[in-house]
Amino acid sequence: MSGQSALRGPALRMGGLVLALVLLVVVGVATGGERFWSTGNLITVLSLAAVTGVVSIGMTFVITSGGIDLSVGAVVGLASVWASTRSTQYMAEDYGWWVIPVTALIVGLVAGLINGLLVAYGKMPAFMATLAMLAAARGLAEIIAGRRTQIVFVEPFFDVLQARPLGVPMIVWIVVVVAAAGWFLLNRTTFGRRTVAVGGNAEASRLAGIKIKRHTLYLYGLTGLTAGIGAVILLARTTAGSSTHGTLLELDVIAAVVVGGTLLAGGRGTITGTVLGVLIFSTLTNVFVLNNLDSSVQAIAKGAIIVGAVLLQQWFASRERTTST
Amino acid sequence: MVDVDPDRAEQRAEQPLLRMRGIVKQFPGARALDGVDLEVRPGEVHCLLGQNGAGKSTLIKILAGAHQPTAGEVLLDEEPVTISDPVAALKLGIATIYQELDVVDGLTVAENIYLGHELATGGVTRRSDAARNTRQILDRLGHKEISPHREVGSMPAAGKQIVSLARALSRDARVVIMDEPSAVLDSEEVGNLHRIVRELTADGVAVVYISHRLEEIRQLGDRITVLKDGRTVATGLPVADTPTRELIKLMTGRTVEYAFPERSGVPEAAAPVLEVEGLGLGDVFQDISLTVRAGEIVGLAGLVGSGRSEILETIYGARRSTSGSVRVGGKRVRSGVDGAVAAGIGLAPEERKSQGLLLDEPVYRNITLSTFARMARGGLLDERAERAAAREQVEALDLRPASVDRDARTLSGGNQQKALLARWLVHGCRVLLLDEPTRGVDVGARSEIYGLIRRLADNGTAVLVVSSEIPEVLGMADRVLVISDGRAVHEGPAEEIDEHAVLDLVMEGSVA
């Protein structure tokens, strides 16, 4: 009986998320009609969700392992600035447009690895290590950019990243690919299994011979890498790098991951849930904008969704506990 | 034997202060208490004696309001009472001082003492009142030197114990239960503790005192109740004229006999697999040397806190040794857990749930936690192979229910243990370290676990096992090391030593 409920639990949770998304779409169609249910608007919804979406995939891993990364927003800002400095762009003109995205990815990866070193080997609480990175990365970005917006002038960069294969913007394709890769990594590889194991019971994993420190390092590196990808998407969408890019992104990302059903305490993570969580928030924003509603009201609705989703999760969890013991 | 005044016990009121009658506590799958009677008089030190698993902790928890008895009654002043929760226990005047001192490190002495019943007016704490009362209580305990404003986290264990005691007094406790209070103290502090206990009893407080040290019980106790397998086997024994031999006899000799598998006899020529030399870990244990040959089961016997579990964890690399070496098959083991696992050492830890299992993951993933990476191809999980390997073990070990997809949480203790053994069977380790393999396993499933361990050994695994149940170590192992205070005090074939001798070794420090 409990075996059944263990199978039913996740499916039920996913069903709830899909239902919430469908409800939002129904409200969108009812209040916005054509303005909401058009290819153009739906693609806008997806494009605006791209940065949050990509970073949420990385965050899903860290949270599944029982950690947290508060620095992703600041790292997105830093990577966007670093990848759009004059010297980076001159290099891109000399060697090729790819210098810009590669620079952003490296900056993100290195920042993530520093987080990982502090958490795994410096034994700092993840909350504090990444909070420090948040402050430092934002400060460094401001120094590099001199508080100015850096316009990207490397045209080939836009030729590639603003292209629309099959009518869908490249940045949406990037999210699709990252999400698919993330799902595969979490569910089908030893890396994913280690992540779930460490989050479920770090001591048991250590005693079973899993190198949890090294794995923790990789996890934060991965999240930093997704922040780098997020920076590339922002550069492509806004055509500029700025030290204010990604401000408060970490909150949207953590909200989407947790609403999606990944346990903040670790041990259970779902990429599908994260994608649904991102879509729910993005659709919500769109419906509010189309109805000319105040962004403050929108913030309140977001808060309500987070509270509702977490309460539901806890209810599911306690129900599983009682049916299985 | 030491300064027991023969008149002392008689002078006290004859009416018992606390009485427990026919207490039964049934846990799912195990009966922890099966008819316990206890009678405590005001002003006496009543010692509770029994082996690990005899039911002492459960009994204390019932008195402290942490557990509810399944049957039986508790009377205070001959009035039946219900101790529904810890607050109720304190209101009735029953205070418990646990072995793991339950003080809050970040708070001051006074704050700890008044935790949960703060002196306050309209929500604002009356700090000076609390400090003054705290000073009075500490004075009564003979510890004027402790400042009420000192942060408890900065105090040594003995000081924390004083705070625990002071808390009991601040509640006007009439019954104080102390669970192995001397275990965390050095000898000077123990003397002080004894003085305080005597002062408490002089004021008419009844003390229920739990200790493994017979010597201490002789010094301090008035009467003894002996528990065995959840039952009271003797109650109200006068400390003064009950010989040690009698007490040990009461504590041993099980009503439930476990079936141990036949020893297969380790050939003399069998190669040593695990060689530990001069291993030490700070002041936890020192100079432990032992050898386990292929096919041999070696047992470590000793009391809680003797360093048994730490020895296993150090061999496994989970703790960093301060001296000595560990070799497997003649080769020195790299430090750290992964070095031990690579050398072929496996550990089934004492705390199955917190150290062994992923409770919310399916059984097969628990079984392959050490091997999923080896089964994977190029980082891609081979769940089919994992399931197949797990299913094979589930059948071989008769793990029930025979499903590899259930969450580990849903299994009984015995079956969780089987899953952990299965993990190392799949891994194919040469040395298996077992810490309390039958803790929380019900009696029926125990023989099965014993059989399994013997089968592992017969297949050539070197097994090192720790158990706080002495008969279990003696029944299961080929050879036994007796550990007392972090040192090996005896080594020899398991057949040549009995439970009495082991208890004598660990309780008195010498063979009787």
Image (tube, rainbow, N blue to C red):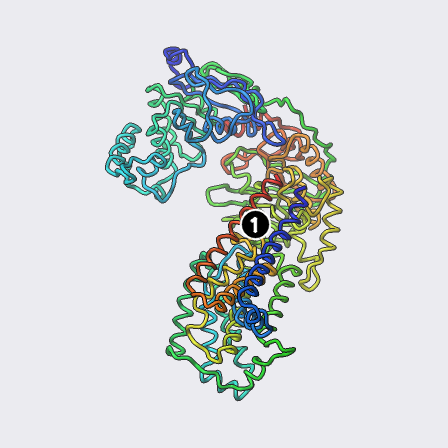
Residue at 26% x, 33% y: name it: B135
Q: How many marks?
A: 1
Left or right of residue B334, residue B188 in this image: left
Would you identify the image quadrant in which residue B127 lies?
A: top left
- Disc 1 sits on a residue from what chain? A
Residue at image mark 1: A201
Residue at 43% x, 35% y: name it: B184
B102 is higher (above) or lower (below) than B229: below
Residue B436, how many percent across, how many down? 60, 37
Residue B60, how many percent across, how many down? 48, 27
Which amino acid does the dot numbered 1 rest on?
Asn
Specify the quadrant that holds the C terminus of chain B. Answer: top right
Left or right of residue A4, residue B149 in this image: left
- Single out the residue that lies furthest toward the bottom: A94
Q: Residues within 10 Å of mark 1 (few under 14, many from 20)?
A: many
Q: Along the line of sight, which residue is nearer the eye, B347 or B356? A: B356
Left or right of residue B25, residue B149 in this image: left
Q: Along the line of sight, which residue is nearer the eye, A145 or A260? A: A260
A208 is higher (above) or lower (below) than B380: above
Residue A66, how many percent across, how many down? 52, 54
Q: Along the line of sight, which residue is nearer the eye, B464 or A265? A: A265
Residue B279, how many percent across, how many down? 54, 45
